[in-house]
Amino acid sequence: MLLERAAGLATKIAEFQRLKGAADEAAIFQTRANQFTALAGKLSLALQSLRDFSEAGVRVPVFNSDARSYAAKAKQLREALVDNPSIINDPPFDLKYEFADRINAIALSAEKGLSASWSAYVAQRADRGSTEVLGALAAIPQFQESVRKIRQCRSAIESIGAIVPSDPKAAIKQINTFVTDLEKAWAELSADDIPASVITFIRTAASEGAMLASFTEEVRTWLNDKGLTSAFRIRLS
């Protein structure tokens, strides 16, 4: 009786160890699966974002990712797993330092590139009149309301640029609306007691840039009298 119980116990212990070994192996597979799923998700999101930005007309600089070599490693690992799943415990290369960390770096580089490109794009769209010019014009009572509208539009555009959008086309559509309002505010910049040549100079300087010929003696005198001359710069292009 005792021997039978001992034999039964030995069988149960062996079964337990087998199941425990299988469970440990399954846990390893699950850990790797979670890691690869997270990496795949990051890459997929980065790739889709790059495509969306390209279609929206926002250029993202090409960065050196050495993607082909990592694609080759992924193929090598996939084929090895098909032949022998347990190779995940002893892969043909260092999964963390030679693969996972590198893939993660590619995704991070894409994210940084998208963020920098989006910030630059929005800054360019909001660039309608320098901060110095607006500050100087705000000191003139006749221009204060127009300056308030201009600043409000610029602030709205800049706030859109603070976060990389998931839908750049929709974000650009919002920006276009604010840019139209911004240009309208500059176009409405006027005052009955200010020379028309001065108004024209300020408007064009704030948008596409005023021609040097438009900087007439009347304009120069008015800007000097108001202390605004230093707010404008000559740009050679």
Image: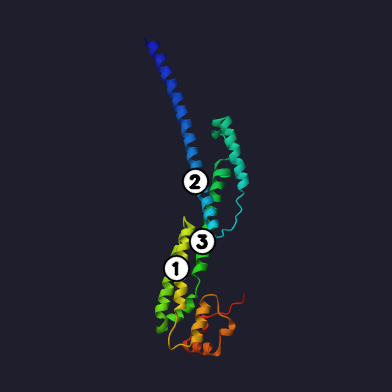
Q: Residue at x 52, y 87 (%)?
A: 219
Query: Going by the image, does 97 lie left or right of 27?
Result: right
Q: Is residue 135 visible in the rendered structure shown here?
A: yes
Q: Which label was assigned to residue 45?
A: none
Q: Amino acid at mark 3?
A: Trp
In three-dimensional space, the C-alpha distance between marks 1 and 3, rounded to whole angstroms, equals 16 Å
- Residue located 47% across and 56% down the image: 167
As measured in the structure, the alpha-carbon distance from the residue carrying label 1 to the one carrying label 2 is: 34 Å
Location of the C terminus (image quadrant): bottom right
Residue at the spot 60% in from the left edge and 43% down from the top edge: 71
| Image height of 98 relative to 236, above or below | above
State the mark number for residue 118.
Answer: 3
Looking at the picture, which amino acid does disc 2 mark?
Answer: Gly
Task: Give the structural element (helix, strand or loop) at label 3.
Answer: helix
In the rendered structure, which amino acid carries the disc numbered 1?
Phe
Residue at image mark 1: 178
Give SS at disc 2: helix
Going from N to C along the chain, the mark reached first, 1 or 2, is 2
User: Contact, CB < 8 Å: mark 1 with mark 3?
Assistant: no
Which label was assigned to residue 41?
2
